Amino acid sequence: MRAESKAILRDSVISRRQGILATDAKGIGLRLFWHILPLAGVLVLMGLLVAASGITRDQMVSVFEAVTIGHVAAFFAVTVAMQALSAAKWRMVMQHLPAGDSPPPLRSSAFLYTCLGAVLSFVLMPHVAKHAGRALGAKFHGGLPAGKSVAASLFEQVFDLVMIVVLAAFGAILLAPVLTPYIAGALGLGTAAVLFVLRRPQMVPARFHLADLLALLRRPVALRLCAISLGFYLLTALRTFIVAIPAGIALLPVEFFASFSLVQLSRLIAITPMGLGVADWTWASVLGLLHIPLALAAGFVILMRVLDLIATLAAFALAVVLAKLVGRS
């Protein structure tokens, strides 16, 4: 009887372990699926864009041949300026949070962590990647609390979000009034979500410093954050315009502003890395409304993606070098 009891107990333990392993395997499989799905979506969307545009190899080569060293240098310089502005905004918020647990990061470190987030956007959603890069860098390189880093990053991104939504609303009015209700709906939903959280601060853990962040809204630093967000937005538009020149995209200033604003808005709802596919199809659709051939639009967005990839990696390399130089000094 004792031997039989031991055998039953052993079989029960084995069965329980097998069940746990099966559950773990299922969980890992689901996580992999949700990571792979956006990447698969990118391939499908970009493939459909290339196929629908009918762009030929010769057309694509001619687009890249029109790019000069000056275009590449200007694109890289604006990319570095954008990352530096974003890092300065994040560091500004960190400076205004209580410094009892940790001081704010150095300028070179803030730039490095922000560039790391840009690199992570190759495989993650852009805004998730930015917060993840800053949290990882702050935690494992700078020894700063990850919660505080993420809270400051999310807070400063709110100013970018507001800027994008407001300017996209104006862009929709200028380009196609029929789109205005959708922009207004998105703005209303975003405002409702923010107000819901603000009225329930107890929902947010203390390590995210919600009360301290809300206090910043009533201080002059909020205006500086708005100004930096506007500067970041204008630099992003300038970088896009630099690519539009060799790509042969000729638009009136009002048309360019409206198109760019709507594309930036589409990046906010994209679940794909770097907004790939979603922002590109938005560009193609909006440019199509402005009677730009789809092949020309496809060449433009592909060129933009290639230059963005190169400039982001180069900016990250520059940030690593700067951080090491500052560390030695």
Image (spheres, grey):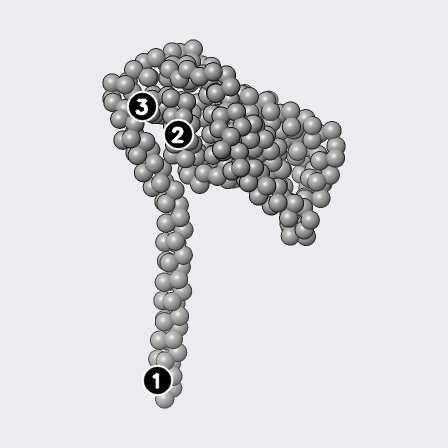
User: Disc 1 or 2, which lies upstream in sequence?
Assistant: 1
Badge 3 density bin: few <14, some 14–19, many ≥20, Cα 10 Å:
some
Reading the image, the residue beneath label 3 is 295
Q: Is residue 24 visible?
A: yes
Amino acid marked by disc 3 = Ala
> Which residue is pictured at 27% across the width and 24% down the height?
55
Reading the image, the residue beneath label 1 is 4
Extreme bottom residue here? Answer: 1
> Which residue is pictured at 69% across the width and 28% down the height?
223
Quadrant (top left, top right, bottom left, bottom right) of the N terminus: bottom left
16 or 34: which is nearer to us? Answer: 34
Asked which secondary structure carries label 2, the reply is helix
Distance (Cα) linking label 3 and label 1: 75 Å
- Is residue 200 positioned above or below 152 on the image? below
Whether pointer 1 and pointer 2 mark residues with C-beta atoms closer than 8 Å, the reply is no
User: Disc 3 or 2, which lies upstream in sequence?
Assistant: 2
Looking at the image, residue 92 sits to the left or right of residue 11; the answer is right
84 or 201: which is nearer to us? Answer: 201
In percent of width and height, residue 68 lies at 38, 11
Asked which secondary structure carries label 1, the reply is helix
- Is residue 254 positioned above or below 283 on the image? above
In percent of width and height, residue 260 lies at 48, 25
Badge 2 density bin: few <14, some 14–19, many ≥20, Cα 10 Å:
some
User: Disc 3 or 1, which lies upstream in sequence?
Assistant: 1
Whether pointer 3 and pointer 1 mark residues with C-beta atoms closer than 8 Å, the reply is no
Looking at the image, residue 245 sits to the left or right of residue 160; the answer is left
Displayed quadrant of residue 53: top left
Looking at the image, residue 195 sits to the left or right of residue 72; the answer is right
